[in-house]
Amino acid sequence: MAKATTTENLESVAIRFAGDSGDGMQLTGGQFTATTALAGNDLATFPDYPAEIRAPAGSLFGVSGFQINFSGKEVFTPGDAADVLVAMNPAALKTNLADLKRGGILILNTEAFSSRNLTLAKYESNPLEDDSLDAYRVFPVDISGMAEGAVQELGLPKKDASRTKNFFALGIIYWMFNRPIEHTEQWINAKFEKKDPKVAQANIKALRAGYYYGETAEAFQHNYVVAKAELEPGHYRNITGNEALGLGFLAASELSGLGLFLGSYPITPATDILHFLSRHKNLGVQTFQAEDEIAAVCSAIGAAYAGAIGLTTTSGPGLALKSEAMNLAVMLELPLVVVNVQRGGPSTGLPTKTEQSDLLQALFGRNGESPLPIIAPDSPGDCFHAAIEAVRIAVESMTPVLLLSDGYLANGAAPWKIPQVSDIPRINVKFRTEVEGYQPYLRDGNLARPWAIPGTPGLEHRIGGLEKEDGTGNVSYDPLNHEHMCRVRADKIAKIAERIPPTDVYGSDRGLVVVGWGGTYGAIRAGVEMARSAGHAVAHIHLRHINPFPRDLDDVLARYDKVLVPELNFGQLALLLRARVGGQRVVGYNKVQGRPFGEQELFETIVEHLEEK
């Protein structure tokens, strides 16, 4: 006799998978994300990695988590709190329980709740046996034991059999939320069939066993349906910010007709850009894994000098190491693109956690008067367009450009509508070939100097870090020439504002405006939506171009009584805005905890500032 199951319709759900860094939580979350995207939901994800490569099993600091928020409506963030928590051991429960909603579903891997693991997680008693979990709907499941039992006939070593437990847990969640398992089965076969057919069979068996367990176990009386989202028609794929940056630079190469060269030193969380681009040598991409950050950026400068898109990527302290060479590129006036995927600092800091604390360093972290254009994408998909924009500015103005992403965007994923390259304006590239009238530091309408490829007869010129004479490029120590050249380089960056779109304002034209940049977009927009729904006069401005700002920004901000600036730093953009519109009207909301803002958190902050006299 089949069990009675009640199916409920939900508007949105946030699920978190958590376990040891070796338990496959990122893989599990990634597969659920891919299947959910295919099901037509809007979604956002938040992978949460430990900093240690492989922390001791069962330890609190070795927990890896993955949260996905999916809905039949537009999704802005991975969700403030989880509706469902799958905890593979006591440490995962201890570090994630505070983020589970009261009354939420809690699925626990009972075999992992041994006395040793409870001690490692600093539990004085077993939460499965006391009343500490009474506020939640708890489902104790022997995930490890049943996964091993499901694959026993294959004769795998116990260690290999145990590794299938994440697929068993995934199978339960697939049943609970009416998700098909076929896509994951195909993925397993593609990944493991050639390497080890037994491993492929084992993972599929565990996945099916978890699904059938959810279907037949009396404990699970409910499953849930989340309707498809009404997305704009088109072809979509699931994409992370780092993947989108890689695709954006590939598109920029196609749009400009230039070769793409990446010089990079591996560093978390930017390394995936190097991994991604290194797989596309068939598209003419050249990647160089350098011995250090300085060699990486210098190789990219060399590529730009030779007529390619010179790209270098980094995170954290890597930007500091690149700063001297970036300043050389300022003096050389070459189209270098520097990607900084920001993370928690200072020093090594929180290498796997997100932060926005490199803005002032990006603006001012070089000696002398050396302004650079700075742009910041606002979502994983927007990283694609930001990469193209960075190359466009670099080439049109013959300048290094800094692109500030962050760990939240880099690792997070969302559905992305695939654009047609034919719909994106081409990047105009002009190499100087005429000898007559040539001077290496003459200027065009953008104040850009000519791009002369080495080896072009008659266009030989000096390069180097010493100050250049206006026009000729000869070394000059003349004080008036030095000041003139500094002003010209600064004016060139300021002139980029003429090609920046006007400030985009969402919401009210009075009252309070929330101004953000980078990966805070989703949480800010959600908080503003909640405030507007409550009848408040609130607007949202999200800045992609931070240097230079849009030309109309000052006039737009003047319409509002107060400017609220939420940042994952101690107020760096707010500092810049206070200098423009007056200190009293600009207030910051700041934290540096390695975690993104929550939607409810920003809604409450907005209301608090609206209610202040």
Image: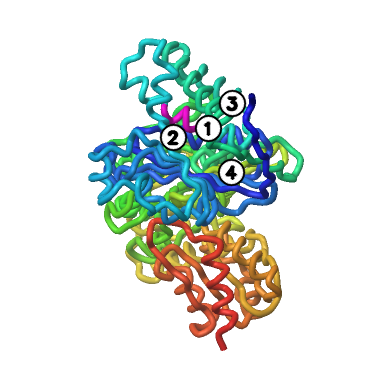
Report crowding for label 4: few under 14, some 14 to 19, many 20 or more residues within 10 A (C-alpha).
many
Report crowding for label 3: few under 14, some 14 to 19, many 20 or more residues within 10 A (C-alpha).
some
Asked if the residue under mark 1 is in contact with the one under mark 2, i.e. CB atoms within 8 Å, the reply is: yes
Amino acid bearing label 1: Ile
Q: Nearer the viewer, mark 4 or mark 2?
A: 2
Residue at 39 percent of width and 59 percent of height: 358
In the picture of the structure, the residue carrying the numbered disc 1 is 172
Amino acid bearing label 4: Ala
Which structural element holds mark 1?
helix
What whole-number distance in Å separates the C-alpha atoms at marks 3 and 4? 20 Å
Amino acid bearing label 2: Val
Query: Is residue 275 shown above or below 503?
Result: above
Q: Quadrant of the N terminus?
A: top right
Task: Specify which label sits upstream in the sequence, 4 or 2.
Answer: 2
In the picture of the structure, the residue carrying the numbered disc 3 is 181
Q: In the figure, is residue 608 to the left or right of 368?
A: right
Query: Is residue 496 shown above or below 279?
Result: below
Q: In the figure, is residue 373 to the left or right of 552?
A: left
Whether residue 325 is in magenta: the answer is: no
Residue 404, visible in the rendered structure: no
What whole-number distance in Å separates the C-alpha atoms at marks 1 and 3? 10 Å
In the picture of the structure, the residue carrying the numbered disc 2 is 141
Q: Position of residue 63 (x, y in %)?
A: 34, 43
Residue 87, visible in the rendered structure: yes
- Name the foreground residue: 103 vs 289: 103
Q: Position of residue 187 (x, y in %)?
A: 53, 22
Quarter location, residue 178: top right
What whole-number distance in Å separates the C-alpha atoms at marks 2 and 3? 20 Å
In the picture of the structure, the residue carrying the numbered disc 4 is 414
Q: Which mark is residue 368?
A: none
